Amino acid sequence: MNLDSKNKLSAAYIFLAPAMTAIFAFFFIPVISAFVISFTDFDIYSLSDYSNARFVGFKNYINLFYDQLFWQALKNTFYFVIFAGPLSIAVSLGAAMLLNSKLVRFKGIFRLTYFLPVVTTLIAVSIIWRFIYHPKFGILNFMLDFIGVNPIDWLGDPNLALPAIVIMSVWKNFGYNMIIFIAGLQNIPQYLYEAAELEGASGWQKFKSITIPMLAPTTLFISIITMIGYFQLFAEPYVMTQGGPLNSTLSIVLYMYNEGFRWWNMGYSASIAFVLFFIIFIATIIQFKIQKTTEFD
């Protein structure tokens, strides 16, 4: 390596050092600390004196298998991801195709309108939707009353509470994915559609044979970030239902929060966090595998 290359390498390290130091200090150290804590019985007494924490090995992870509340929270979280994820992506793609169409006017206004929920505070949105779902004074029941439907306790019924949160979350988040889909649609060469029209292809055939394949990388990216975000469901049930009724909206992150900051079982809470991490990691790998298989086919 000559002197010029060494100088360039040194300059690169100097520029990277501040960012790498911050990442190491505020990401790796907390993650490693949490991983170590997950093998202890770290609680409120250990906060004042770390020597009170005792090493318990895999006890926290083993206890999770016998914890009915953990399995309920995991089931609720998977329900939310499975239903809210595809629905959010489908609504985002539909809105993106509509706003990318030449038939629609005032596209800027529509894009701004659809994106506004994304930049609105999630806590504020949750509070507003809590009023929308109110069994007596909510606007949703008020509108249903016009078609003869009796008032529904959306957030008080164990069978309806989680679907109600799914609808609210899709409304809150679809604007972000919509913007990414619009960017993906605008990168599809128009000559492909023109050639398909010359061949007499219908709208559905063009969508199936051109739009979907060309949007595959964009869809994979959106699927992964949506899945990761939805696995971390917290604020919506925390504000709207506190995990109820009958734990029907208790998510895995809300359960982790309750264990760590309500009951101060921080070692146990850290073990839940790492189980969630491995679930998201495995789900991401599966999505990449499916994407590669689709490309190969």
Image: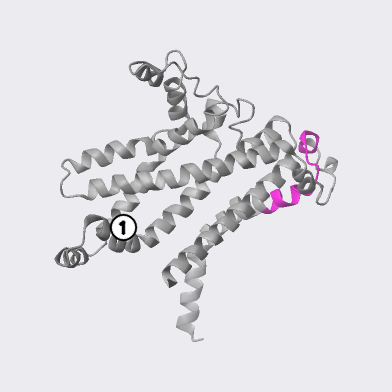
Q: Residues within 10 Å of mark 1 (few under 14, many from 20)?
A: some
Extreme residue toward the top, this view: 136
Quadrant of the image for the C terminus? bottom left
Q: Disc 1 marks which residue?
A: 184
Residue at position x 79%, y 38% from top? 46
Q: Residue furthest bottom?
A: 2
Q: Residue at x 51, y 73 (%)?
A: 10
Instruction: Name which residue type carries label 1.
Output: Gly
Please check the rendered image and state whether residue 37 is part of the magenta-colored stretch, yes or no.
Answer: yes
Q: Residue at x 71, y 51 (%)?
A: 35
Residue 66, position in %: x, y? Answer: 78, 42
Q: Position of residue 132 (x, y in %)?
A: 42, 22
Q: Position of residue 153 (x, y in %)?
A: 50, 20
Residue sitting at 52 percent across and 26 percent down? 240
Q: Quadrant of residue 137?
A: top left
Q: Is residue 228 magenta?
A: no
User: Magenta region's main secondary structure?
Assistant: helix
Front-most of residues 108 and 280: 280
Please state if 89 lies on the left or on the right of 202 as rendered: right
The range drawn in magenta is 32-47
Question: Which of these two is toward me, 241 or 94?
Answer: 94
